């Protein structure tokens, strides 16, 4: 299960703290986080080009202060093998000059071209969430610690709830978030 835990405006020194794993199929060719040669302002992991020839990312940042993260909605019965790669949405946002709400509004006509996804996109002005499996419009994420898996935002799955609680506790009791401690929290193997 892919899992993204993020604290938005809940730490006095960091407006965004992100801890995430990517539980992907082994045959999916990827590269670790780095600056992209063709987009030198983008720091992100990279899905290599697929059969549609479009690279993308599941999590990235831009030097302009943008953040994007994406999870797939697992719905095997709805999977369209000809759908566009979802990771291009994150990359499109990170490279656009649009504000988050404008980007989502402008791109919403294209969202049916993708299999199910959850998209977090934000900048210093706010963090937004959208899923093409909900009928709701995009909405601004509330301050605090939230979680996203292969279902919708804050779906109360046991692993998400355990991890969310532990990340909240860590941020409450530390001046500086510890990457090592966050990685330890994500080593949760309880089914």
Image (spheres, grey):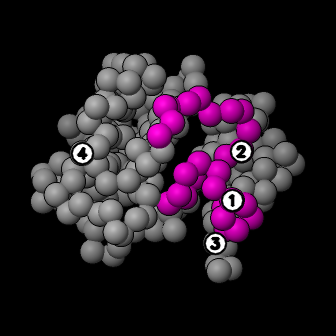
Above or below, comparing residue 168 to residue 40 in the picture: below
Nearer the camera: disc 2 or disc 3:
2
Which x, y percent locates residue 63? 42, 28
| Residue where numbered disc 3 is placed | 187
Q: Say which label, 2 or 4, has the lower sequence index.
A: 4
State the separation of the CA atoms marked 3 and 4.
34 Å
Mark 3 or 4: in front is: 4
Spatial distance from mark 2 to mark 3, Cα to Cα? 18 Å
What residue is pinned by disc 4?
A: 113
Which residue is at the front of the view, 176 or 122? 122
Q: Residues within 10 Å of mark 3 (few under 14, many from 20)?
A: few
Q: Secondary structure at mark 4?
A: helix
Q: Which residue is mark 2?
A: 145
- The relative height of residue 41 versus residue 124 in the rendered view (above or below) is below
Q: From the viewer's perspective, is residue 185 above or below residue 53? A: below
Q: Where residue 151 appears, x then y in whole percent?
A: 53, 57
Q: Is residue 35 left or right of residue 181?
A: left
């Amino acid at each position: 299960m892919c899992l993204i835990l993020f604290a938005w405006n809940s730490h006095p020194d960091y407006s965004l703290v992100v801890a995430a794993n990517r539980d992907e199929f082994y045959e999916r060719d990827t590269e670790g986080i780095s600056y992209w040669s063709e987009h030198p302002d983008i720091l992100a992991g990279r899905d290599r080009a697929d059969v549609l020839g479009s690279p993308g990312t599941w999590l990235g940042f831009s030097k302009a202060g943008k953040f994007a993260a994406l999870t797939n909605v697992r719905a095997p019965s709805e999977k369209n093998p000809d759908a566009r790669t979802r990771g291009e949405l994150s990359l499109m946002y990170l490279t656009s000059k649009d504000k988050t709400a404008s980007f989502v509004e402008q791109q919403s006509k294209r969202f049916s071209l993708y299999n199910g996804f959850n998209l977090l996109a934000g900048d210093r002005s706010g963090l937004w969430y959208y899923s093409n499996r909900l009928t709701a419009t995009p909405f601004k994420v509330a301050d605090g610690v939230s979680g996203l898996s292969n279902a919708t935002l804050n779906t109360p799955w046991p692993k998400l709830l355990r991890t969310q609680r532990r990340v909240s506790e860590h941020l409450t009791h530390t001046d500086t978030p510890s990457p090592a401690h966050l990685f330890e929290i994500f080593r949760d193997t309880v089914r």
